[in-house]
Amino acid sequence: MSDAPSTPGRPARPGAPSLAPGGAVLADLRLVAAGLLPPGAVLGEEPGGEGTATALRPDAGVLGAATAAGALVLTDEEGLPLARLDDVVADGDLARGRLVVLHPSLRADAAGAAAGGRSVLLRRPPTPADLDALRAGGTGLRLLVPTGSATPDGVPPALLEALAREAGATPPELVPLPLAWRGPAGDAALLRAVLPALGARDVVVLPAAGDDVGGLLPGAADGGAGSWPGTLAALRRGDADLPGAAPGAAALLRRRWPRAADRGLVVLLTGLSGSGKSTLARGLHARLERGGERTTSLLDGDVVRRLLSAGLGFDAAARDLNVRRIGFVAAEVARHGGVAVCAPIAPYARSRAAVRRMVEEVGDLVLVHVSTPLAVCEARDVKGLYARARAGELTGMTGVDDPYEVPDDADLVLDTSRVAEHEALDRLEDHLVAGGWLARPAPRG
């Protein structure tokens, strides 16, 4: 095991761009810095890799600037430089370079911590019965608590640790580990790389709902689902009782998964300019205000552009950032139990996926595709944008010379060329009632 070199000096070469990766990229970066992943990893994607050049996938603008400068600085969310890629070269759409650690907080303090006892990988919360059974062998326990993401069932790292403590885990037994889950195949590759480097032996997996432990980590023992599937199902239904959960654990879980009527909600309407999404967003906001059940905020695309995203352009990177900004604000509304109604064009699947991730960490998201055809939107052309684009006066117009990526994960599809505004709003409001976010629709008529 060989850690990445440390250089506490200057964080960047002149002109080097910076990037705040977050998520799985930051978690993998910590693993590489600690020697728990090979330096040739593609951060956030492929934990294996050959050679000594660490790689990640930035957007095209950052990649170009990094290759021109020969360096890329990686920071935390507040801009603190954590590491630097030196001697950066482009490998397709990857940036590859030699990783230099700039800040000691980057290093995972887990290397060797799992050696000498039974290692228990927490993909679900443990119960007192789990810990009693695991301790019966008489060897020391090391409970591996992934900190890079929520569990596959959506339990955030801090809550997972709190539930382990509630079940009776002691501080010496808890080993935080910067693992970020990314789906069955990616999780299996990650664990095959990290656990041997960690020195983990006699591994037991407490599985998430639906886990195939044999496929996830061959040779590991399956700790069993226990009461977790029933508890999780009751949480998601909003049941008053949580079978199998002790009172203290139930209280912690209920704060994370309140009843749908008490959970924060983001309604994201996406569609072409002129599709009717802003009209529907304003109408839904008015109905929710009239109903009085939920505190509601409206984040309309045009208003956001004038305020939150003033100064942003309309190239792909700026559009992506605009949608992510809307998602960040909407997620904060949801975090505090409110409803955010958003109506950006949001043409790119990656932007919408980023918003979903932000929101679903703290609440629920309903994605509405306002699917009005381009020909209808262009005929409406209330802002004259399509006419300008067809005349060559405007470039990058979504649907004309810039793509709109049709959502494949929409919860509701509404075509305002086929249904009247009031009918579309009725359907949308009925969907919210059926999901439990509203007790009843607002008075109609």
Image: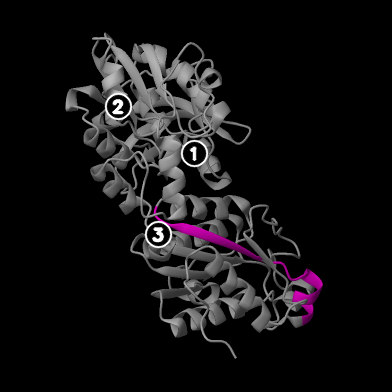
Query: Element at badge 1?
Result: helix
Between disc 1 and disc 2, the foreground one is: 2
Residue highlighted by disc 3? 259
User: What type is the residue that disc 2 sits on?
Assistant: Ala
Quadrant location, the N terminus: top left
Residue 295: in magenta span: no
Pick the front one: 392 or 374: 374
Quadrant location, the C terminus: bottom right
Q: In the image, is residue 353 above or below residue 7?
A: below
The residue shown at (48%, 31%) is 43
Between disc 3 and disc 1, the foreground one is: 3
Counting from the top left corner in percent of width and height, residue 71 is at 44, 34
Tag of residue 129 = 2
Residue 374: in magenta span: yes
Query: Which class describes the residues within 10 Å of circle 2: few (<14), some (14-19), or many (20+)?
Result: few
Counting from the top left corner in percent of width and height, residue 312 is at 50, 65
Residue highlighted by disc 1? 66
Residue 15 is at least partly visible in this image: no
Counting from the top left corner in percent of width and height, residue 23 is at 43, 40
Q: Quadrant of residue 294?
A: bottom left
Q: How many numbered tags mark residues here?
A: 3
Query: Element at badge 3?
Result: loop
Question: Which segment did they paint magenta?
Answer: 362-379
The residue shown at (56%, 54%) is 351
Pick the front one: 90 or 154: 154
Pick the front one: 224 or 395: 224
> Separation of disc 1 and disc 2 at Cα?
52 Å
In the orientation shown, which residue stands out farthest toward the left? 171
